[in-house]
Amino acid sequence: MAESYEQEPAIDHIKQLTEALDSGMFVHVRMMLNDMPPEDVAHLLESSPPRARNLLWKLVNVEREGDILNYLNDEIRNHFVDQMAPEQLAQALEGLEVDDLADILGELPESVYLEVMASMSDQDRHRIEAALIYPEDTAGGLMNIDTVTVRPKVTIDVVLRYLRMKGLPDSTDSIYVVDTQDRLLGAVSLATLITSRPESIVEEVFDGNVVTIVAGKSASEVAQLFERRDLLSAPVVDEENHLLGRITIDDVVDVIREEAEHSLMSMAGLDETDDTFAPVWSSAKRRAVWLGINLLTVLIAAQVIGLFEDTIKVLTALAILQPIVPSMGGVAGTQTLTLVIRGMSLGHIVSGNSRWLIMKEIGVSLINGVLWALCMAVLAWFWFSDNPHATTLSIAIAAAMLVNLMVGVFAGATLPMLLKKLNIDPALSGGVILTTITDVVGFFTLLGFATLFF
Amino acid sequence: MAESYEQEPAIDHIKQLTEALDSGMFVHVRMMLNDMPPEDVAHLLESSPPRARNLLWKLVNVEREGDILNYLNDEIRNHFVDQMAPEQLAQALEGLEVDDLADILGELPESVYLEVMASMSDQDRHRIEAALIYPEDTAGGLMNIDTVTVRPKVTIDVVLRYLRMKGLPDSTDSIYVVDTQDRLLGAVSLATLITSRPESIVEEVFDGNVVTIVAGKSASEVAQLFERRDLLSAPVVDEENHLLGRITIDDVVDVIREEAEHSLMSMAGLDETDDTFAPVWSSAKRRAVWLGINLLTVLIAAQVIGLFEDTIKVLTALAILQPIVPSMGGVAGTQTLTLVIRGMSLGHIVSGNSRWLIMKEIGVSLINGVLWALCMAVLAWFWFSDNPHATTLSIAIAAAMLVNLMVGVFAGATLPMLLKKLNIDPALSGGVILTTITDVVGFFTLLGFATLFF
């Protein structure tokens, strides 16, 4: 019977296990844990507060630790790996695929790494050393080396008999055709192997136009390629077209998810690998940095207000209107910033179309600037109708609104491109710089115009 | 020879094509366009301003339009579909896979839909009607119905001969085993077909534990399942376990990307299907709504300041310190909000662990609140040392900072869960509600404490 996927099984597990943990039923928890697939155990650990997490980890069977580590997010994985003795780690990692192994080992401190490598078999050691040549965020770092290769002149029947004898590595959907120097000629999908006449020759049926990836290609480009071309796997080659390995979609899915989350998390000064259930102190330390940076920027804005203290003293209504202009500029700018950052990460925005985009955004901000400036002018006029300076307030806030909306949107459109040129992550720093600009310009224009027209 | 993937071909294409378009070399552009794979043409259209986009679309060969529409984002696709006559659309859509067809047709206005259906073949019409039973964002809406099924008692050899005769649908990695009532018994992967002895019987080698998906499952749950289990495809069944179709990873990748982008775009009041290169007017209209909502919230905050006009009149320094407290509360709250929204969309946060998470976030905010309150107290003391009310200012801002950081973080942690219970999208409205709270509380505490201690 095919097992049906139950409604969010993780939720049930988390509840049940938490209750069992709380009541000290460790034997029961150990049984449940070791019945769950490793990816579900990993999900459970990621969803548990630190104390429960450490307890659960201790209840996992040693021979399953490697599989589970493989599915954990970087931060939590490193936490567990740090606690393990090198021999224990080497034992846990036995049997993992090379690309996953390399990911885990690549993050270890030098001394632990050497100890773990020393306790591995020669063959594993060589394979890992080969995989670690490539940085984790490149095609070489994503690839597995368990490719099956055949020569172009053999018949399908021979290939099938060979595969029946040797078996196929997990998630293989194609085998590769190479020449005597191991240079890639093309691929034969399993579907082609099955549907071709057994007496046909590989070179008659193989696909010579298969999309290949050079090992140095960045993981993010690999992800875009897989996404756009709906690939399930692709061969990885070196600069001379020698076959090195293959990348499969399951590894790329993780890259796609992390890429997409990166912008969201960075815009709040967080990291996409941040652990939701990190302990209080480590969370507090990380967030303090971001709050400190924000405090500096808002102090700059406060200094701008200070320049106009004398005007505020005689026209206190300005203090009431004060938050409106920076807020509207910040929101308008953030919309543009978000749109541009997403467009850049999808590869939509390039030098050929960025000028059009900036002009368009300025157009949008002009329309909205005029609209909301007029609204605010009328509103302020009625609001402060018993104030002798109602006209001044009205004109000042309308003018400031228009200018700040346009400045915010212009900054939102140009900042990401500028920061990218300077090799600064736009998602991380774009928002902070933007709101500093809209705060400073917002306060300066409102109070400046008011002083001018006073 | 295997074709190597060139460095970001899209950039070159966009530049070249824009130049060719600008100089009126339409024949050249038409040739280039029709040499590109449909997914690249779609990417090019998505990366082009409206005028160039419409021009390019006219140069695409009619028989390629369906394929290209299939790869376009919803907004742009609907734009082109709206311009096409029903017969023209029916012709363009010929040959598309049913799940893709259903996506496009499901978005059409009733009258156009009926006309397009009328000009289709009977067989296509029936298949589409069957696919449209399920909403687009469910497993049924994602599935394709081109499954290959076999009975459990036949030999692998018979299966292979059958497949050699019938062929395999695109991106098939498994065939399904069903009983006489079409109920799913399990799956046989192509790899198993190849590596099993030809004389073995299907029921000896098939996988009876294949993960199956019920047609009503939400697309987002399907995506989480594919991601966690590293699936390439999965059979879709009805409530009685009858096989309906299959979902393949290429369709799920789009869901994963859109899910992950949804939070980012919503937090800026945008939609993940928004077109970066939408015309000025349509962008301006959409953004105006968001700016209007923001204006309302900031007007509420301004009203709070108005309550304390008398205090500000005698202690103008308050106007200078005014933006600091709301800003810090907003930033701290947004960090928590983002973390919680991401944790919820990954399925990490459930009722069993949310209390721990809220307590933890309060702990984090207490640490940071005390830290930055002390910093601000000292800073304000020196800053306004020649002001007779320096002590009042110092104490007021420190107390307000502590309270507002804690309120912001508490709101950031609880709002998404509360909104989700009310069926409101936390990513869209969470940020607005949060900053309204931190603005109001920020101004009220700073000015309130100052009035109190004055």
Image: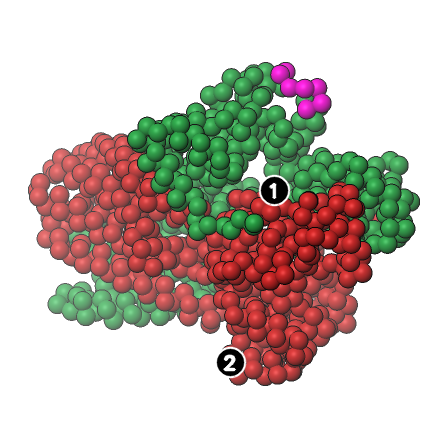
Chain colours: A red, B green
* Residue at image coords 17%, 66%: B384
* Residue at image coords 63%, 28%: B95
* Mark 2, residue position: A110
Q: Is residue A133 above or below residue B125?
A: below
Q: Bounds of the magenta span?
A: B118-124
Around disc 2, counting alpha carbons within 10 Å, would you say few (fewer than 14), some (14 to 19), or many (20 or more)? Answer: few
Query: Does the image show residue A443?
Result: yes
Left or right of residue A10: residue B437:
left
Q: Which chain does tag 2 point to?
A: A
- The three-letter amino acid code for the residue at tag 1 is Asp
Around disc 1, counting alpha carbons within 10 Å, would you say few (fewer than 14), some (14 to 19), or many (20 or more)? Answer: some
Q: Is residue B326 above or below residue A275?
A: above
Q: Give the Cα separation between the discs numbered 1 and 2.
A: 41 Å
Q: Is residue A365 above or below residue B412?
A: above
Q: Could you say where residue A163 lies in the image, as x and y percent from the top left?
A: 77, 57
In depth, the one of A390 and A347 nearer the eye is A347
In depth, the one of B424 and A336 nearer the eye is A336
* Residue at image coords 79%, 40%: B163
Q: Could you say where residue A150 lies in the image, as x and y percent from the top left?
A: 69, 57
In depth, the one of A264 and B169 nearer the eye is B169
Q: Could you say where residue B252 lies in the image, as x and y percent from the top left?
A: 61, 45
Q: Is residue A45 above or below residue A121?
A: above
Query: Does the image show residue A327?
Result: no
Q: Could you say where residue B43 lies in the image, as x and y percent from the top left?
A: 46, 39
Label at residue B251: 1
Q: Which chain does tag 1 point to?
A: B
- Check disc 1 and report its element: helix, strand or loop: helix
- The three-letter amino acid code for the residue at tag 2 is Glu
Please tell me in which quadrant of the rendered image residue A242 appears.
bottom right
